[in-house]
Image (cartoon, rainbow, N blue to C red):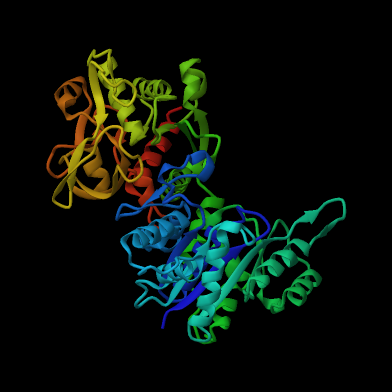
């Protein structure tokens, strides 16, 4: 029978509930259990697709085309279990579904209320599709006490009673701060957080206390006493030098043992953590270092590029080197010479993005990489800017641009994708329509050109990668582009949509329309990032 673990947070946000869920999932897998991870987000947006990355961080995209919370990226990277549309839900989507039913008359004239209708919808989401899974881990976004989170807390409280006895476990993350002037760690924030949780009917089984130093035995005992949990179930969650050490660190603190104890499981196999330990050793003792410049427009918030930076780390692991990221706001290249900022980097990466702001700076970065022979990796928008740069400076089309920036561009090298094939149905989009859910989203196949650089990297000619974009490189410019020296080395299976471009006589210059970072994992680095870091390492040795 499927067992359910509910992870909540208190005191402050950003304590690392998503990482804790992912690490616990990895630990349970290491003991031979199957897992599924889900995220319940209390905000009113239907999904994070239209939210600013600066507010919310990156939007993680699943194979089946869901725009989801970035925590699902953690889940995939740590467990390898592909996330789906059914693994992330928001208050907005729940209310949207309920109101649609109400307008249709499904409730037969009854009053529609938070309890039972909203809470029942949440419970249905949590319980759906878990056949054959040993553990389902459900993370509740936000912090206990938030008004918008109350229906979710009420729903999991009810599930604690609805499910058979011994089938649920409640884990609560709190903050245990150290007050320098007092010279001691304080338990009161944790006590108050648990008090808030208990006031709505949930008694935590396990407490995870985020801290920057070991918790003294006396404080652990105090927390256990006042929060009504076993002392052994007070788990210190200390800061670590790499997130990939978290599974092992939590195992040493006994998190997985305590979770299994809650469910009465005593004879579970010893966790196999050898791969994680070897991975961490590479991160701590690299054989070299490369510097990669990320030229973006959301560099003020690193979570906006979370999957990207992790994928670079994975590429470093594959090559046994450390990866130092140099964050550069693309707009600076519109005011200053690129040389002073990019001269000492070993690779340049231009990530995805939307809008005209900073576009010319990204084009300048692509130009610098192409002319100087520095490895260049353009992802989504980064590929489009590389194509515009090549058409302008190699093919002589000075007016080459994107219709995203100029509606009636004389040379529309990049244009709004107004139609494409989706499950054998022609889907038409219009400029000016709703933004939410109007993109090419999810996994699509691509066919690679035999003998190309990317075919060599992948080791196969048919691939599947995840997309998130509205604009495409205009295939009408393919001939001019290839005459200038940049080839289209990957297309959609019907040959209509360009997926990959590369420059054959360059050390490493690849642009992709998709987002390979979304499928990279620490124990299974993406081949493009592996190859890119390898090229950057070769470049570093030339200096």
* Left or right for 144, reference 518: right
Inspect this view and state whether residue 82 appears: no
Task: Answer above or below: position of 263 versus 480.
Answer: below
Q: Pick whichever, 85 or 74, lies toward us.
A: 85
Q: Left or right of 269: which side holds 433?
A: left
Q: Residue at x 53, y 65 (%)?
A: 152
Count of numbered circles on the image: 0
Spot occupied by residue 63 in the image (x, y as percentages of width and height): 30, 54
Q: Quadrant of the N terminus?
A: bottom left
Q: Is residue 139 above or below residue 530?
A: below
Relative height, residue 324 to residue 261 (above, below) = above
Residue 386, position in %: x, y? 32, 26
Residue closer to the observer: 38 or 258:
38
Quadrant of the rendered image containing residue 264: bottom right
* 252 vs 373, nearest the viewer: 252
The part of the image, by quadrant, that contains residue 346 is top left
- Whether 178 is drawn above or below 308: the answer is below
Judge whether residue 474 can be spotted in this image. yes
Q: Nearer the viewer, residue 353 or 98?
A: 98
Please state the horizontal and vertical placement of residue 370, each as a whole percent of the image.
34, 23
Residue at (37%, 37%) from the top-left corner?
535
Residue at image position (71%, 69%) is 195
Q: Name the residue: 73% across, 75% down.
A: 224
């Amino acid at each position: 029978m499927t067992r359910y673990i509910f992870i909540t947070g208190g005191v402050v946000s950003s304590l690392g509930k998503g990482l804790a869920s992912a690490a616990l999932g990895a630990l349970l897998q290491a003991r031979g259990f199957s897992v599924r991870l889900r995220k319940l987000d209390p905000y009113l947006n239907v999904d994070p697709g239209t939210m600013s990355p600066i507010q919310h961080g990156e939007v993680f995209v699943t194979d089946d085309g869901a725009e989801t919370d970035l925590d699902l990226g953690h889940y995939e990277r740590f467990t390898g279990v592909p996330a789906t549309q059914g693994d992330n839900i928001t208050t907005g989507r729940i209310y949207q579904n309920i109101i649609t039913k109400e307008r249709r008359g499904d409730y037969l004239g009854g009053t529609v209320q938070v309890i039972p209708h909203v809470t029942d919808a949440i419970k249905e989401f949590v319980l759906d599709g878990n056949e054959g899974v040993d553990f389902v881990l459900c993370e509740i976004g936000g912090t206990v006490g938030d008004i918008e989170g109350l229906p979710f807390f009420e729903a999991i409280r009810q599930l604690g009673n609805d499910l058979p006895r011994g089938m649920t476990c409640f884990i609560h993350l709190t903050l245990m701060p150290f007050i320098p002037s007092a010279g001691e760690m304080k338990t009161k924030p944790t006590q108050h957080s648990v008090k808030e949780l208990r006031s709505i009917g949930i008694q935590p089984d396990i407490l995870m206390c985020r801290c920057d130093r070991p918790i003294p035995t006396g404080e652990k005992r105090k927390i256990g006493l006042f929060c009504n949990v076993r002392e052994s179930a007070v788990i210190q969650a200390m800061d670590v030098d790499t997130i990939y050490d978290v599974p092992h660190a939590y195992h040493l603190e006994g998190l997985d043992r305590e979770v299994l104890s809650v469910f009465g499981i005593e004879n579970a196999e010893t966790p196999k953590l050898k791969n994680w330990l070897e991975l961490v050793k590479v991160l701590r003792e690299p054989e070299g270092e490369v510097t990669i410049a990320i030229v973006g427009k959301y560099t003020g918030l690193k979570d906006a590029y979370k999957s990207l930076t992790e994928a670079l780390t994975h590429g470093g692991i594959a090559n046994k080197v450390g990866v130092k990221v140099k964050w550069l706001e693309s707009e600076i290249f519109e005011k200053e010479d690129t040389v002073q900022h990019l001269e000492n980097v070993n690779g340049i990466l231009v990530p995805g993005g939307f809008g005209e702001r900073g576009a010319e700076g990204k084009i300048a970065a692509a130009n610098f990489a192409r002319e100087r022979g520095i490895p260049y990796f353009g992802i989504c928008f980064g590929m489009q800017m590389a194509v515009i740069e090549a058409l302008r400076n190699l093919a002589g089309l000075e007016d080459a641009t994107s219709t995203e920036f100029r509606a009636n561009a004389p040379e529309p090298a990049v244009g709004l994708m107004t139609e494409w094939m989706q499950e054998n149905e022609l889907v038409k989009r219009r400029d000016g329509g709703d933004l939410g859910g109007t993109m090419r989203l999810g996994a699509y196949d691509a066919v690679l050109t035999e003998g190309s650089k990317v075919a060599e990297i992948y080791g196969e000619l048919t691939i599947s990668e995840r997309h998130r974009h509205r604009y495409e490189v205009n295939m009408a410019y393919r001939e001019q582009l290839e005459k200038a020296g940049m080839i289209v080395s990957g297309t959609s299976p019907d040959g209509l949509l360009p997926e990959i471009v590369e420059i054959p006589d360059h050390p490493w210059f690849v642009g992709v329309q998709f987002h390979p970072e979304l499928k990279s994992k620490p124990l299974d680095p993406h081949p493009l990032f592996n190859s890119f870091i390898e090229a950057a390492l070769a470049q570093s040795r030339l200096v």
